[in-house]
Image (cartoon, rainbow, N blue to C red):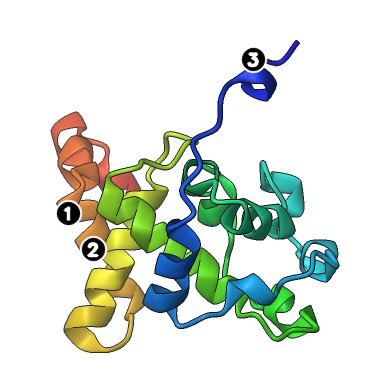
Amino acid sequence: MDESLTAPVQIDFDFLPQVERGSGIQASVCYQCRKCSNGCPLTFAMDHPPDRILRFLLLGQADQALHSRTIWVCSSCETCTTRCPNEIDIAGLMDYLKQEACRRGIPDPRGNRTLAVHQCFLDQIRRRGRVHEGSFMNAYLLSHGVWWRKILAGTLIHDL
């Protein structure tokens, strides 16, 4: 039997009001029609579909939502937001949950550099008001040691 199905779940009923205040999005009006999940082009890569993330919020299961791979896989294409009959900005909620996971120091469960790319992307927005792809990639590669590893290994010339 799957251990995660029998493990006790931490309940935090203060999390949904915190999310609604912080994001300005009223998630509590979701009635679980699943239109968001049925339209999402990335559900194949998610551990929980978008409607389940909303359900976690409604049930006070903050840890389940914040440790989910779904919030990191979401590309903010806003298909879910467009399809929602209650006009919930689900893509905006996913962005807020990413930020909350960053604030709490919760890493991307896939163990890759999604968090690093996300932080570098937001830093570019803060500094310039927009993202210039060339400077974004340079900033990411320099700040996270990718270029230094390539320079030391002598393989940077292959990327030029």
Q: Which mark is nearer the camera, 2 or 3?
A: 3
- Separation (CA) of disc 1 from disc 3: 41 Å
What residue is rendered at 57% in x and 65% in y?
Answer: 75
- Please identify the quadrant where the C terminus is shown: bottom left
Identity, as a three-letter code, of the amino acid under mark 1: Leu
Pick whichever of labels 1 and 3 is earlier in the sequence: 3
In the picture of the structure, the residue carrying the numbered disc 3 is: 3
The quarter of the picture where residue 132 lies is: bottom left
In the picture of the structure, the residue carrying the numbered disc 2 is: 138
Identity, as a three-letter code, of the amino acid under mark 3: Glu
The quarter of the picture where residue 122 lies is: bottom left
Depth check: give the residue in front, 89 or 30: 30
- Separation (CA) of disc 2 from disc 3: 43 Å
Residue 87, percent from left and from top: 70, 86
- Separation (CA) of disc 2 from disc 1: 6 Å
In the picture of the structure, the residue carrying the numbered disc 1 is: 142
